[in-house]
Amino acid sequence: MQLAKLFAPAVAALVFSVPAMAQQMGGGMGGAPSVDDQINQLDEMLDLNDGQKEELNDLLTQMQNDNTAKQEEARELQQQLGEHVQADYDEAAIRADAERLGDLTAEMTAESVIIQSQIEDVFTQEQRDQLDEAMAQQREQMKQMQEQMQQQQQGG
């Protein structure tokens, strides 16, 4: 159980960093990489079997579809809230839009944690250990990059 508590953030970071890393490496057409690209990257790291690839494909596709619609709705709500900023404002409309945005954020967070848990369940213990190690290395690289940037800012 303790491992699961430590592992969930690692899976979350991986699931959300895979698209970002692939985008930085030129994957995709200027947007997030495809589900196939994400699965291929996980396969290279963890040597997935065909069943795992299929399960991950289903989960990542579901996550992508769910997130796209909800993120669009959240952007629209944020825009609507911005449009409410005026001298002649409607407090009830502002509160209703803000409440829906809060509800939407809560839904996206809950669904994200659920899918992360389902993704974790796809991996073997050995793969979880490999993933944990890869995430630790990634965190260390990020820490080193941040330290280098701070040194450059202080020195320049």
Image (tube, rainbow, N blue to C red):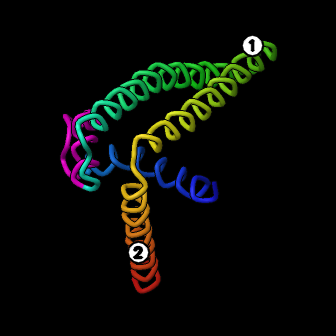
Above or below, 149 relative to 69: below
What's the amino acid at mark 2? Met
Query: Which residue is found at the position 46% from the left and 19% from the top?
Result: 69
Crowding at dot 2, Cα within 10 Å, few <14 / some 14-19 / many 20+, comes out as few
Q: Residue at x 49, y 26 (%)?
A: 71
User: Which residue is located at x 23 percent, y 36 percent?
Assistant: 50
The front one of 53 and 146 is: 53
Q: Is residue 151 left or right of residue 33?
A: right
Residue 132 image-quadrant placement: bottom left
Which residue is labeled 1 in the image?
93
Q: Which mark is residue 28?
A: none
In this view, 67 is above or below 37: above
Residue 35 relative to residue 73: left or right: left
Depth check: 86 or 99 in front? Answer: 99
Residue type at mark 1: give it: Ala
Disc 1 and disc 2: Cα gap in Å?
A: 44 Å
Name the side, left or right, on which 102 lies relative to 140: right
Which residue is tagged 2? 149
- Was residue 105 drawn as part of the magenta stretch in this picture? no
Give the secondary structure at mark 1: helix
Secondary structure of the residue carrying tag 2 is: helix
Residue at far right of view: 91
Residue at image location 27% in from the left, 56% down from the top: 45
In the image, which residues are magenta? 25-44
- The location of residue 5, given as percent across then percent down, is 61, 54
Quadrant for the N terminus, please. Answer: bottom right
How far across and how far down the image is residue 88, in percent?
Answer: 76, 15
Query: At which x and y percent is residue 118?
Result: 49, 36
| Of the image marks 1 and 2, the number of the one nearer the N terminus | 1
